[in-house]
Image (tube, rainbow, N blue to C red):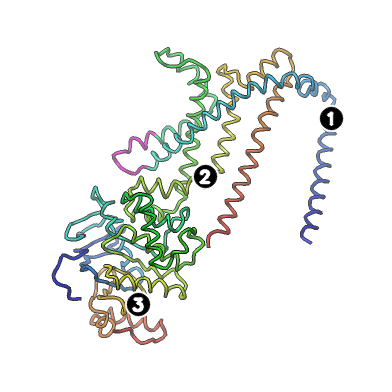
C-alpha cells in the first residue's frame, strides 16, 4: 500500500519534471540567438579539446583546497577557543580573535586576495615567499579560518553549560573539560556545516586565478582567449560540479542522520 | 552522631551567597564529621542546591568560608581543580557525557584529572560499576539506560576520584517514582560503607532513615537542625512545623517518618 503510493508519487514527479524540462528546452531553443549561443558556450569540439588541460589544471585546485583545509580545521578551532576565553588576563587574545573574524568575514574575498597576494610580496621583505601559489594558500586559509571558527563557536555554545559544569565538578581543568567533554560533542554537531564551508572553499579556489596561479579557471580563460569560444569555461564548471554535488549530497545525508539521532536518541 | 571531637571532613562557616542583589544564602554554618550523613530539607528555592554548589566550589561565595579537613578552600584558589577532586557532586539532571560509554564516563576523571593510566582508570570504573550493580551496562551509552541507572552511573562517576565528601543535589527529583527506590538503595549502601554525605532531598522517609542529622533550610537560613527523630518527631521552630505539615498533607497523611 505504502509502496504503491510511493511509486505513484515517483511517476508524477518524473512526468512533471519532464514536462518542465521540455518547456525550458523549447523556449531556450526557440530563441533566435540560440544557435550562436550554443556555438559559443556549448561546442562539443572545444569541450573535448579543452578537457585534458582544464582537468589537469584542476589538480592545482585540489592541492590548494586540501592543504588549505588541513590548515583551516585546527586554526579555526584555535580562533574559536581564543574567542571563548573568559580569563581577564587573556582579554587581548580574545579581542584580537574577534577583530580577525570580523575583518575576514566582512571584507569580500576577492579584495583580500588582491591586497595580500599582490601587496605583501610587493614589500620585497627578505624571506617572504613570492610564489602566487603560496599567497593563494595564505589568503584562502585566512578567509576560511574566520568562517570555520564561527562554525566551531556555534557548536561549542550549543553544548549545554551543565556538561562543562559536570566535568569541572569532577576536578577537570577548564582546558580538560573543553578537550574531553565539550569539543568532542561540539565537533560531531558541526560536521555538516563544516562540510558546507569546505564546498565553498573548493569553489573559491577559482578566485586565486587573479594572482596568476594557473588553476583550472585560469587555464580555461587562457583557452577561451586563444579560441574566442567560451566552452572551456563550461568544461571547468562541469568539473567543479562533479566534485561539489556528491559533497552536497553527503552533507544533506549527514544532516538528516543528525536530525534523526536527535529525535530518536534522546530517551 | 556524637563523634569524638575531630577535624570535620567539611565545615561551612557563615556562608553568604548573592544572586544579583538577592541574598540566597544568609550565613550558613554547617559541619560534617567524617562518616556523617546529613540531609538538607526545605522547600524549593530555600537555598539547598546553591549551598551544595558553593560547597563544591563551583561558584564564588560572597561571605564566610569553607574548610576541607581543616584547610580553608575557595573557588578562587589556584589549585581549585585539585580540591574539587576531593569532593564529589551528583546533580538532579544526571549530566552524564552522552558521547562516552558508561565506563568511559566513570573512567574519565581518574584518567584525566588524577593521572591514572587508562588501564587503571578503566579497572577502577569497572569495579565501581560492578559494586553498584551496573557491571553489565559498562559498554552502553547513557541514553540506552533508564533514569535510575543513569543516576547511579552519575554516582559512580562522582565516586571515581575517591572523594572525601559526596554532595547530592535532589538526585531523585527527576526520576519516576518506581526508579527512585533503586537510587536511594544505592545511597543507603554508601552510607553504610561510611561515606560522608551531604544530601539535599525531598524524600523525607529516606532522610529519616539514613541521616545522622537533618537540617531544615528556609530563605537561605539554616532554621533548625537535629537528629531525624527530633526534627520529624518534635520540631521546635514554627517554620519547620509548617513545612513538615505541608509535606505530610501532600504525601497523603502518611505518618511522619521517625526512627
- Tell which of A106 and A4 is nearer to you: A4
Quarter placement of the C terminus of chain B: bottom left
Residue at mark 1: A29
CB under 8 Å between discs 1 and 2: no
Quarter placement of the N terminus of chain B: bottom left
The tag earlier along the polypeptide, 1 or 2, is: 1
Q: Nearer the viewer, mark 1 or mark 3?
A: 3
Q: Is residue B98 magenta?
A: no
Coordinates of residue B196 in the picture (x, y in percent) = 26, 67
Coordinates of residue B21 in the picture (x, y in percent) = 29, 59
Please report, as a chain letter, where disc 1 is located.
A
Asked whether, in this view, residue B219 is left or right of residue A63, the answer is left
Residue at mark 3: B206
Q: Residue at x 31, y 79 (%)?
A: B208
- Image quadrant of residue B40? bottom left
Could you classify mark 1 by the number of other residues whose Cα lies within 10 Å: few (under 14), some (14-19), or many (20 or more)? Answer: few
Q: Nearer the viewer, mark 2 or mark 3?
A: 3
Residue B30 visible in the picture = no
Amino acid at each position: 500500500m505504502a509502496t504503491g503510493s510511493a511509486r505513484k508519487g515517483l511517476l508524477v514527479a518524473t512526468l512533471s519534471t519532464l514536462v518542465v524540462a521540455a518547456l525550458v528546452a523549447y523556449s531556450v531553443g526557440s530563441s533566435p540567438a540560440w544557435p550562436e549561443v550554443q556555438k559559443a558556450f556549448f561546442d562539443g569540439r572545444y569541450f573535448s579539446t579543452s578537457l585534458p588541460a582544464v582537468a589537469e589544471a584542476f589538480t592545482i585546485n585540489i592541492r590548494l583546497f586540501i592543504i588549505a583545509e588541513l590548515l583551516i580545521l585546527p586554526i579555526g578551532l584555535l580562533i574559536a577557543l581564543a574567542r571563548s576565553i573568559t580569563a581577564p588576563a587573556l582579554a587581548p587574545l580574545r579581542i584580537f580573535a574577534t577583530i580577525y573574524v570580523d575583518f575576514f568575514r566582512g571584507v569580500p574575498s576577492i579584495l583580500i586576495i588582491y591586497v595580500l597576494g599582490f601587496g605583501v610580496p610587493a614589500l620585497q621583505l627578505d624571506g617572504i615567499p613570492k610564489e602566487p601559489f603560496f599567497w593563494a594558500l595564505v589568503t584562502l586559509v585566512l578567509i576560511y579560518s574566520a568562517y570555520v571558527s564561527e562554525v566551531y563557536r556555534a557548536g561549542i555554545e550549543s553544548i549545554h553549560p551543565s556538561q562543562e559544569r559536570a566535568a569541572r565538578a569532577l576536578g577537570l581543568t577548564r582546558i580538560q573539560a573543553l578537550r574531553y567533554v565539550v569539543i568532542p560533542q561540539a565537533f560531531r554537531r558541526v560536521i555538516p556545516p563544516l562540510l558546507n564551508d569546505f564546498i565553498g572553499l573548493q569553489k573559491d579556489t577559482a578566485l586565486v586565478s587573479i594572482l596568476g596561479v594557473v588553476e583550472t579557471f585560469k587555464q580555461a580563460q587562457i583557452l577561451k582567449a586563444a579560441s574566442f569560444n567560451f566552452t572551456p569555461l563550461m568544461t571547468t564548471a562541469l568539473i567543479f560540479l562533479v566534485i561539489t554535488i556528491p559533497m552536497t549530497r553527503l552533507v544533506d545525508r549527514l544532516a538528516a542522520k543528525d536530525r534523526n539521532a536527535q529525535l530518536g536518541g534522546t530517551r | 552522631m556524637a563523634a569524638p571531637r575531630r577535624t570535620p571532613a567539611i565545615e561551612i562557616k557563615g556562608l553568604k551567597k548573592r544572586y544579583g542583589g538577592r541574598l540566597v544564602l544568609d550565613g550558613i554554618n554547617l559541619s560534617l564529621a567524617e562518616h556523617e550523613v546529613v540531609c538538607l530539607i526545605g522547600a524549593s528555592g530555600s537555598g539547598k542546591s546553591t549551598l551544595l554548589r558553593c560547597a563544591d566550589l563551583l561558584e564564588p561565595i560572597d561571605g564566610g568560608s569553607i574548610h576541607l579537613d581543616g584547610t580553608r578552600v575557595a573557588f578562587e584558589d589556584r589549585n581549585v581543580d585539585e580540591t574539587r577532586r576531593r569532593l564529589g557532586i551528583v546533580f538532579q539532571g544526571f549530566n552524564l557525557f552522552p558521547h562516552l560509554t558508561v565506563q568511559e564516563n566513570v573512567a574519565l576523571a581518574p584518567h584525566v584529572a588524577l593521572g591514572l593510566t587508562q588501564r587503571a582508570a578503566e579497572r577502577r570504573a569497572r569495579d565501581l560499576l560492578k559494586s553498584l550493580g551496573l557491571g553489565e551496562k559498562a559498554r552502553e551509552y547513557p541514553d540506552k539506560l533508564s533514569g535510575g541507572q543513569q543516576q547511579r552511573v552519575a554516582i559512580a562517576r562522582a565516586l571515581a576520584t575517591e572523594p572525601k565528601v559526596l554532595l547530592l543535589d535532589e538526585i531523585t527529583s527527576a526520576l519516576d517514582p518506581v526508579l527512585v527506590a533503586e537510587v536511594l538503595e544505592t545511597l543507603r549502601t554508601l552510607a553504610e560503607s561510611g561515606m560522608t554525605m551531604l544530601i539535599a532531598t525531598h524524600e523525607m522517609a529516606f532522610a529519616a532513615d539514613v541521616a545522622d542529622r537533618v537540617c531544615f533550610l528556609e530563605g537561605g537560613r539554616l532554621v533548625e537542625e537535629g537528629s531525624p527523630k527530633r526534627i520529624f518527631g518534635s520540631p521546635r521552630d514554627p517554620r519547620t512545623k509548617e513545612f513538615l505539615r505541608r509535606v505530610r498533607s501532600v504525601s497523603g497523611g502518611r505518618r511522619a517518618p521517625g526512627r
